[in-house]
Amino acid sequence: KLCGYLNKLGIKGPIKTWKSRWFFYDENKCHLLYYRTAQDINPLGSVDLSNASFDCKVENGEGVFEIRTPSRVFTLKAISKQAMMYWLQQLQVRRWEFCNAQSRFPLHEGAKVQWNSVLLTCFCVLVCFYIDVVDNEDFLPPVKTPTEAVGLKAASLPAPQTSTALQNISLKHPWTEIQNTVYNICGSKQLWGKNGNVFSFSEFQEHPENPDEEQEAEEGTPEDGRMEPRLNWVRKARWMNSGFPGLPEELSRERNPMDKVSVLQQQILTLTEEVKSQKELVKLLHKALEAAQQEKRVSSMYLTAAEDKDRLELVRHKVRQIADLTSRLEALEQEKKELEQILTLRDSHIQELKEHVQLLMEKNHAKQEVVMALTEQMARELSDPLQEANTIAAETLYKQQEEIEHLKDDIDAYKTQNQFLNSEIHQVTRLWTSVAENEKALLMKCACLQARNCQMESKYLTVLRKLQEAVPGLPSSHAELVRNLIQEALQWDVKEEAEEALSFELTSALCPSSEYDEYGFMTVPDYEVEDWKLLAKIQALEIKSNNLRSQEVVEKPLRDRWNSVGELSPSAELKSLIRSGIPVEHRQRVWTWIVSRHCSHLPDHYQWLLRQSKSTEHPACRQIELDLPRTLTNNKHFSSPTSQLIPKLRRVLLAFSWHNPAIGYCQGLNRLAAVALLVLEDEESAFWCLVHIVENLMPADYYSDTLITSQVDQRVFKDFLSEKLPRLMAHFEQYRIDVSLITFNWFLVAFVDSLVSDILLRVWDAFLYEGTKVIFRYALAIFKYNEEEILRIHDSVEIYQYLRFFTRMIVDGRKLMNIAFNDLNPFPMKLLRNRRSMHREELEAELCELEQIKAAYVKEKAEQGP
């Protein structure tokens, strides 16, 4: 049991006093209870150690340490430094045992498989703890138990008292003091009752109380008001050490404790003398018994002898023994006389030596008196300023030596303090790691529950959409009910629902939800058509559910891999990482690196272009102003004419129109520059990113007036669609669907305003690094992703309507990426170049033929005249 007396610092207003308290550790609740004495039944208060930390400071004094809890700080003082270190070490051990013994959060059947890994992790943490125990010895070696100050034996010792008896009483809890006093009196009477049994203890009637919580002055009362087993053991120890049953009646008549002690001491001395005399008597009796037994054996042999000859031989043997003993006795007496003569000579010699020593001492004393007189005479003669300076120097040296000794003591104290603090930091770190593991497991469980909730909401909205389609065939009351349900569903806020279901701190730590994402795109697009609003809501819930499910399994390992990437350099591993998607915190750095590899930034070139655009108005200036309000209307940074990124976008487009006069400005460049601004933030970096896309990634004439290369890519894409997805292409041909009406804008602006922002930026990650082949891959993957849905539609109008918004129904970006980079392989760049060359020649021939037809038609009209 961890118990013992400590002094506790009590604060009553400006007055601070040390009060002696008996402390006892309750291992069931990890509380440190404290009483006024060891015999009290009701504690004055308790200290919760489960969330506490320990500290000792040298400047507070020897034996003083602190227990810091979230609510207050307890200052305690042990009788010695060893006792203090023992208490601190034992409290650390008890706190660790309690924290590791606490049960984990309950598991449900649907999550048993998921929590097996958590249990394995906790087992590994415990194994690491037992391994770290050896390391912990390096911080603070085990302290020996100070039995005189700690343990049940300390309860039998007198309690340390303060200067006055009243000073040690807790005035904050008078009722508790009265209860303890009454119980002690009752316990004493029961102990010295008629039966005289020191181990008979009766239960004291409980008087539950609810004292007020203590603030600054004395101590609060814990929830459990008693420690009966502890009290019984303490009382037994005290009464057993006091004596034994059946003491003389004079002891019970004595009222003064000092008189009792003196009586007991006198009795102990008497009994000790009696025991010594009895031991001497026993020794004499043993010798007499041995002689009698020897005589008995000889007599028995004499009596049992059969003949007189044998008896005579025994008598002769006895006579020889007597003669031998007589001669030995005479020799011993002669030796005794010689020793007495030697002793007499030595005594006389010792007497002579004593006289000689006395004479030497007298001479020595006389010499010392002469030396002292000469020393005083020299001191008087040498009492000059130099002597005084030497005396001062000697005193200074002495003081410095004393200071050095004090500093050495301080160094030892600080070393001990440092060892303990290192041990405390080490243990608190382990506790924090354990709590972090539990929090991580709870976050995983929270994510699973929230993902399931999003799936249920999505299914509910899907059912409402089906009912919405069937509204014309429903009765008016049912149709009105469906419309009301749809309106309520559209007004749901994802963030508010998450806060109602779970704590927002937990959900936001794992996957924050908001009206806008990290780059300002709306998580739920605001469409004018009510049917599309419901679809956008369904899509937002599906995306959120998918992100929550993949956060721990996919996104966290990917983020860890990106965090380990140092300096960027082209490699197969970097290519794979970029295809998987760049995390938000790394995207700006990677895009800047990609653009700088292909574009040499001319110093002050961008600033010169801005000055040029200010001094001279470009012909494309009017078209740029018309397109600015139509740029990324679903992004909060561009949704309003007063948005902060609108002026930056204007400057980037004007600078590019002067940088590349052959293109100037083409519709679509505004969206490319806007996405670059959102990610790179710096407008000059966004300008060079736009230059990289138009002049390096895209083929020539892609944004020219004729858009000839853009048309070529549409024909190339149809060829790939026929090869990779023949069933879908046959379905389009059957219903005369021209996919270029849908896909032309995909290629022109790299899917901006077609895909949701999360998938769009992942496409751009790979597009900026690899080029236009990525656009072909993702365009084919989009049709592959929705192939079965398209094949189920057998009407050309419905197919066109579905193709208008089907890209925004893609919610699983990982699945789309796997289709684009795995299912569509092989996809060689050489094949793409050959197809482009072939279709460019065909398109140029067709255009040339059209020009000829047009020229012939104009000539014919001119010949016919008006």
Image: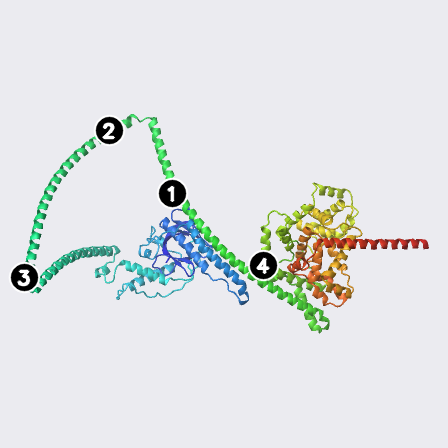
User: Would residue 543 appear left or right of 651 to someone viewing this image?
Assistant: left
Q: Nearer the viewer, residue 785 or 672?
A: 785
In space, the residues marked 1 and 3 are separated at their CA atoms by: 91 Å
Residue under label 1: 409
For the residues marked 1 and 2, what is the alpha-carbon distance in whole angstroms?
A: 42 Å
Tell me the CA gap for discs 3 and 2: 94 Å
N-terminal-most mark, 2 or 4: 2
Pick whichever of labels 3 and 2 is earlier in the sequence. Answer: 3
What element does badge 3 sit on? helix
Q: Quadrant of the N terminus?
A: bottom left
Residue at disc 1, secondary structure: helix
* N-terminal label among 4 and 3: 3
Kind of residue indicated by mark 4: Val
Label 2 sits on a secondary structure element that is: helix
The vertical placement of 680 against 437, above or below, is above
Q: Nearer the viewer, residue 802 or 329?
A: 329
Q: Position of residue 545 (x, y in %)?
A: 62, 62
Residue type at mark 1: give it.
Asp
* Disc 4, SS: helix
Determine the image quadrant of residue 196.
Answer: bottom left
Q: Amino acid at mark 2?
A: Ala
Residue 47 is at least partly visible in this image:
no
Question: Percent from the top left, x then y, of residue 668?
Answer: 75, 53
